[in-house]
Image (cartoon, coloured by chain):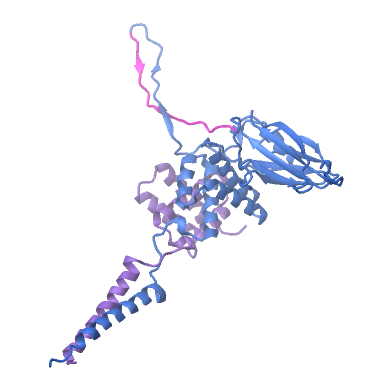
Amino acid sequence: MKPIHWIFVFIALLIGIGAGLAYGWVIDPVDFFDLTPDTLRAEYKADYVLMTAEAYRLEQDPGLAARRLAIFGAHSPSSIAADGLAYARSNGFADSDIALIQELVTALQAWSGLP
Amino acid sequence: MRRFPWWIPVTLLALLTGLGLGLVYSWVISPARATDTEPAILRADFKEQYRSAIAAAYAATGNLPRAQARLAYLGDVDPVPALNAQAQRMLASGESFQQAEQVAGLALALSNNGTPIPTETAAIGPVTEIASNETTTPTSTLPPPPPDVPIVLTGTAETVEPEPTQAVVIQVTPRPTRTPVPAFGAPFKSTGQDTVCDPNLPDGLLQIIVYNSRRKQMAGIEIVVTWDGGGERFFTGFKPEISDGYADFIMTPNIAYSVQLARGSDIVSGLTAPACQASNGESYFGGIKLTFQQP
């Protein structure tokens, strides 16, 4: 084969790799299951924070609220709640819902974590 | 004679090889990281936490449509059995009784034809306290109405006493009237107590079936069984293969039991495993079948 042909072979290899990556990452990625909550879409996370805030309004137990929010992993409960509050404010949540989340954020910021 | 252009099949082979390498890398070595996912594909234990949070929010707000919408995220074919089973697991694993009750309460509300029945979130005390609590109106113990429960705007024109010469009608700003949170309903009545002598059933089997006022079986109803020196709580609906409103309990022979529903019911007391006789003359302990119904 001539040198130019080796260049064709190399280019074909690169095209194949690119096509394989595009297919495997974009067109038909692996099916996900058994995921952790930190992978949830932001709207679901914000709704979970709202659920926690709704329950907190009744229970008035920041420790329990913090444990509920702990499913999102590494971040602190107050920052998770604050993220939910930011999402709620920028995505048209009802004022009453925003107020609930705000109340939760305030409580968690003041909460020391000590019993 | 012209030479075969080997570079063409070699190029195609390189293309296929590259494609294979790309797929192996993207599917096996470094698959795309999951982001922006939905609750339906969460791991089972996280789904349970999600359900618990939904139930806790429902217990606080009484907003059943919102709870139903949230449960739909989880992709359960029927959320009622999933909630009931989770409540049972929570009790078995020693988790907070209050949280298990919230989960069971949501299941009950869903199975009660969409009629929201808020979970009582007050601490559960001894059985005698439960009975007395259930007879009170729930207004003092139930959570405040949800902020986003559908509200009915009743813009009633307020008529002011007319002055001597002119009638004045003031249009006031309509005030939202919150939809009242339904009460628990009337206490359940004990409607049946039958001795069951069936050697195929476990000895001392106490079967309990709970119906609503429309004679539909109710899942998620908490049952309290007490005896001298002990007590146990469990829920209907955990054996859907038998029926939705069914629950059972094994009685120890020669011990008297009392049964009531935690939401308020007649107390059936003095229940003991009856002595039965099989066709071959052998004696064994039979069971009792109790039914409760909401009037």
Residue closer to the observer: B3 or B102: B3
Q: Colour of chain B?
A: blue
Q: Chain A is drawn in which colour?
A: purple
Q: Would you identify the image quadrant in which residue B161 lies?
A: top left
How many numbered marks have been drawn onto this rendered protein structure? Answer: 0
Residue closer to the observer: B106 or B174: B106
Q: What stretch is highlighted in magenta?
A: B166-184
Residue closer to the observer: B154 or A39: A39
**The C terminus of chain A lies in quadrant:** bottom right
Q: Does the magenta stretch include residue B176?
A: yes
Residue B291 in view (yes/no): yes
Q: Where is residue A112 in the image (x, y as percent from the top left)?
A: 56, 58
Q: Is the magenta stretch mostly helix, strand or loop?
A: loop
Residue A70 in view (yes/no): no
The residue furthest top is B164
Left or right: residue B113 compared with residue B293: left
Left or right: residue B276 compared with residue B2: right
Q: Where is residue A107 in the image (x, y as percent from the top left)?
A: 51, 52
Q: Position of residue A16 (x, y in %)?
A: 27, 77
